[in-house]
Image: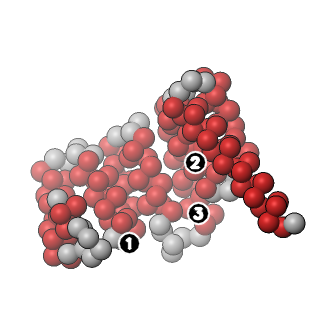
Amino acid sequence: MYSNASKGLKTDKSRADSAFALYAQARADDPTDVTSRTFAASRLLGAGRSAEAYHLAKEGVRLSPVSLDAHKWYWMAVDGLKDRSQAARDSEVFADVELLLKARGNEPTVLMAAADQYESHRMPERARAMEDRVLAIAPVSLSAEWVFVNRYRAVDKQLRDSTSRD
């Protein structure tokens, strides 16, 4: 739906609005349809409509509390609410991250998503703890590979930064 309205560099507003109307109709037809909320939220975020996306993403998490994708879109929507203070956004995201960790905290993909949130919100110690848990419970997983990739990149950045100051 929406992808047909956004071909190329410009989005056709009337086609995008039509796609959003179809998502709204899908939500009206099936009040339990998570996809019509989270997918619409993702597209609204891309269109710079964070406040609208926030409400849909939050509803998606309510309807599917263990869906990692629903939580990720919700976190992005919260981060897009620039009318709120950073502390308020961080607090809301971290509270939701903790709820997801309680439900699925032994899954590497969930731990990595939590680590990404903590890292992006300037909590590297907490991010490192999540990454360490990934390595402990799933050392040969794809998530563990990403832990190593991210750590190698961090070392490389430190080396480049230290040599550029010399």
Q: Position of residue 74 (x, y in %)?
A: 43, 54
Q: Residues within 10 Å of mark 1 (few under 14, many from 20)?
A: few
- According to the picture, the residue beneath numbered tag 3 turns out to be 88
Residue 147, horizontal then vertical, whole percent: 62, 38
Quarter of the figure with residue 45: bottom left
What's the amino acid at mark 3?
Ala
- Residue 125 position, x and y percent, is 73, 45
> Mark 2 highlights which residue?
116
Q: Secondary structure at mark 2?
A: helix
Helix, strand or loop at disc 3? helix
- Residue at the image point whose x is 32% and y is 43% from the top: 63
Looking at the image, residue 97 lies above or below residue 15: above
Q: Give the mark nearest the N terminus, 3 or 1.
A: 1
Query: Which residue is tagged 1?
Result: 48
Above or below for 11 versus 118 = below
| The N terminus, quarter of image | bottom left
Q: Amino acid at mark 2?
A: Asp
From this view, report whether residue 4 is shown above or below residue 38.
Answer: below
* 66 and 140: which is toward the camera: 140
Asked if one can make out residue 38 in the rendered structure from this viewpoint, the answer is yes
Label 2 crowd bin: few (<14), some (14–19), many (20+), radius 10 Å: some
Image-quadrant location for residue 127: top right
Mark whose residue sits in front, 3 or 1:
1
x 54%, y 34%: residue = 143
Instruction: Identify the mark nearer the N-term, 3 or 2.
Output: 3
Name the amino acid, label 1: Gly
Q: CA distance from mark 1 to mark 2?
A: 22 Å
